[in-house]
Amino acid sequence: MISLFFVHTPYHLLLASGIALAKKNSNTNVLVIYRDFEFDDSYFEKSASLYRKTLVLFGNLDHSKSGLLGKLSYQRLFFRNIRRIKELFRKEGVAKIYVFNDQRVENKKAMQFCTDSRNCKVTYVEDGSAVYSSSSSPRKHANSIVQEMKRIIYCLNEPADSSAILGSSKLINEQVVLFPELVRTELTKRKVTELTAEELTASIRFLFGSVIDKIDSLEYSVVIFLDLYDFVSCFIDRYMAVITSIIYLCKNMNKTVYVKYHPREEKKYASHLQSFSERVYFIDKTIPSEAVNCKCERKVIFIGSLSTSLITASKISKDVLRVSIMKLLSLEDKNLRMVFERLGVMIPENQEELFGLIEDFFMAR
């Protein structure tokens, strides 16, 4: 009997491999990876020993969702992926599947195949900060007909938009997260298991040990984790004003600044960051922030807004100063703010307080 891991991002691969390492039985693991982010074969050279096989499915990099033809093409890729997933269930005895996104149509079908077999269980693994936040996918009445059509077209047991909150599908049996005690209330009705700091660190070292060794020492520096551009586009001027102020402050203090793109970023920041090309260092976006964390030995500041990187850094090393600029951007998420506070992530009220945190951190012995 095999276990299937459905991953969409480097972070998913990291957590999946942490679980696979803990299982210590590679013959029962199959990695199913969607082409939703840029990667090369080197990504899987290390992970290959943890999985009996790796199946690459079509993803967001393989199509354009713009226009009617693009959207129709997108649906066609879903059907192709579903056929390949169904083939796995037909040829192999599947005991468990691990999903990170229960809103994706192909994953809904995989969960359905699993529950239909009766001997298979569905485990939801956290997709970052979503399991701790207050956010949910909006349910617009205008989309109800479209969602019902999807349910009929794909023969889904539940509506295509039923998982407004990631991890809330009724087909899920259990969950794996970094901080079980901080999971949002809606996800506490079923068993929640912890992925420990030791398991996470072991996975990071196993997958990215050679990459970590090549990263420059990050001591006495600031690492800025940029949000996905589409998320901040509606307030990009305010967002870039905050980022710019941090860069100039650090340069005046003679501190190195590193910028890390979101793994699904598509170069939309280019025009905004062009003037900083000589003032900052850009970290390869295919390297997970967790691997960057392992290079932080002393006097390093991580800055993000609602970034998962601030949460995982809290799991790996509390020596790094973690700062969320969510209040400077007027981003309100009551649950996530509470989680950050409990994890020791600093949330400055204004620019003056932010600058004070940075200055005091570097001046302290």
Image (tube, rainbow, N blue to C red):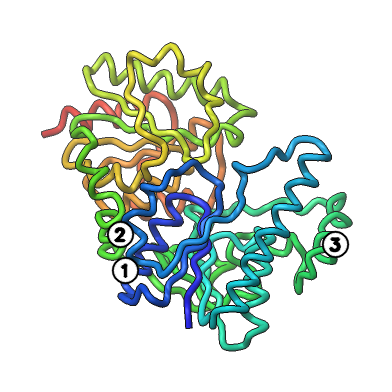
* Disc 1 and disc 2 in contact, CB within 8 angstroms: yes
* Disc 2 and disc 3 in contact, CB within 8 angstroms: no
Q: Residue at x 84, y 52 (%)?
A: 143
Determine the CA span between mark 2 and mark 3: 40 Å
Q: Quadrant of the image for the C terminus?
A: top left
Dot 3, crowdedness within 10 Å: few (<14), some or many (≥20)?
some
Q: Is residue 315 visible?
A: no
Determine the CA span between mark 1 and mark 2: 7 Å
Instruction: Name the residue furthest front.
Output: 91
Could you say which disc has been placed on residue 21 in the image? 1
Q: Residue at x 76, y 54 (%)?
A: 139
Dot 2, crowdedness within 10 Å: few (<14), some or many (≥20)?
many
Classify mark 3: helix, strand or loop: helix
Q: Which residue is identified by label 2?
A: 203
Classify mark 2: helix, strand or loop: helix
Residue 170: percent from left, percent from top:
66, 74
Classify mark 1: helix, strand or loop: helix
Q: Is residue 126 visible?
A: yes
Q: Residue at x 39, y 46 (%)?
A: 309
Residue 275: percent from left, percent from top:
43, 11
Residue 94: percent from left, percent from top:
54, 80
Q: Looking at the picture, does residue 231 appear above or below residue 253? A: below
Determine the CA span between mark 1 and mark 3: 40 Å
* Disc 1 and disc 3 in contact, CB within 8 angstroms: no
Say left or right for 104 vs 343: right
Disc 2 or 3, which lies upstream in sequence?
A: 3
Q: Name the amino acid type tagged 2.
A: Ser
Q: Which residue is identified by label 3?
A: 148
Disc 1 or 2, which lies upstream in sequence?
A: 1
